[in-house]
Image (cartoon, grey):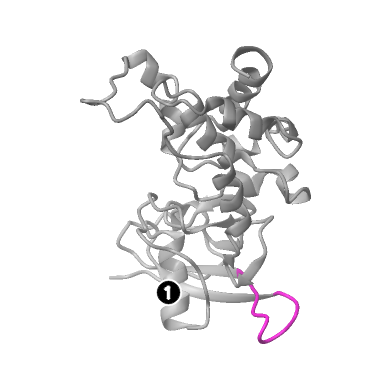
Amino acid sequence: MAVTREPGDRTDAAPDETVQLLMRIRRYNPELRADPWWDEFTVDVEPTDRILDALHEVKWHHDGTLALRRSCAHGICGSDAMLINGVNRLACKVLVKDVMPKVTVEPIRGLTPLKDLIVDMEPFFAGYRSVLPFLINDEGEPDRERKQSPEERERYDDTTKCILCAACTTSCPIFWGDEEYVGPAAIVNAHRFIFDSRDRADRERLKVLSEKTGVFRCRTTFNCTEACPRGIKVTRAIQDVKRAILFDRY
């Protein structure tokens, strides 16, 4: 039989038992009022549900006007990045049992809120596009695949994992204060091609990242590395690019 507990109670309930989670959600709707406000909801969920499941419970059964982004719900698309208990996380990866008995959910910082948990991602993607995040090779189409050694692949393997969730960039205090800074995610995606032995546009990317809006704006706070849901060593990638500009390639 399902067990229901008060919102203030801790729980070591079995996975199939129902618990109550108090959700405090930062809301914003410019059609209703100019300033954001807080709403609270108590939802019935299971300890192994995700915060995304709890948000669905709010939207589907409590307040259908709640706005949020999500797609795959499996930590791959990166669309449901948000501030959960003050930390950038993917809502589909944080379990209810790890935040009980209450949780605070806000939009990620540094990007303009459009409605509730949805922010304007265009500045983020503008930084991403500026670093030419695609393979460039003007040597003509080869007769067969361009081969790499395991060592060559290892050089940039970590930064291929980026899912463009913006968790790293919107955890960066430099990005919060400087909207021109390309941000950690853009640098990670530049790294992925700068150190790819098949690519021939490393100098162009390094030139972009050597500008005042580029990689040297980083102050090595490691917020980005801690925020990355894919475990990418973001700060190390940023340092790799700095060294490439200063000593190796540019």
Q: Give the range drawn in magenta.
A: 25-36
Q: Quadrant of residue 149?
A: top left
Amino acid under disc 1 = Glu
**Residue 71 in magenta?**
no
Instruction: Decide if residue 126 is on the left or right side of residue 219.
Output: left
Q: Position of residue 224 (x, y in %)?
A: 61, 39
Quadrant of the frame with the N terminus: bottom left
Instruction: Decide if residue 64 is on the left or right side of residue 143.
Output: right
Instruction: Decide if residue 180 is on the left or right side of residue 97.
Output: right
Query: What residue would you read off at disc 1?
Result: 57
Give the answer, above or below, for where 115 lies relative to 216.
below
Residue lying at 65% horizontally and 67% vertically, measured from the top left? 113
Q: Residue pushed farthest left?
A: 144
Q: Where is residue 247 in the image (x, y as percent from the top left)?
A: 65, 12
Q: Residue pushed farthest bottom?
A: 32
Q: How many labels does the image show?
A: 1
Query: Residue 164 versus residue 99: which sits nearer the camera?
Result: 164
Give the answer, above or below, for where 17 lies relative to 208.
below
Q: Where is residue 68 in the image (x, y as percent from the top left)?
A: 50, 69
Q: Position of residue 212 (x, y in %)?
A: 76, 36
Give the answer, above or below, for where 5 lies relative to 184.
below
Give the answer, above or below, for where 90 lies relative to 203.
below
Quadrant of the frame with the C terminus: top right
Residue lying at 40% horizontally and 53% vertically, measured from the top left? 77
**Residue 29 in magenta?**
yes
Query: Residue 159 versus residue 149: which sits nearer the camera?
Result: 149
Query: Residue 241 versus residue 114: which sits nearer the camera?
Result: 241
What secondary structure do most residues of the magenta stretch adopt?
loop
Residue lying at 46% horizontally and 78% vertically, measured from the top left? 59
Label 1 packing within 10 angstroms: few (<14), some (14-19), many (20+): some
Mark 1: which secondary structure? Answer: helix
Q: In which quarter of the image is residue 34?
A: bottom right
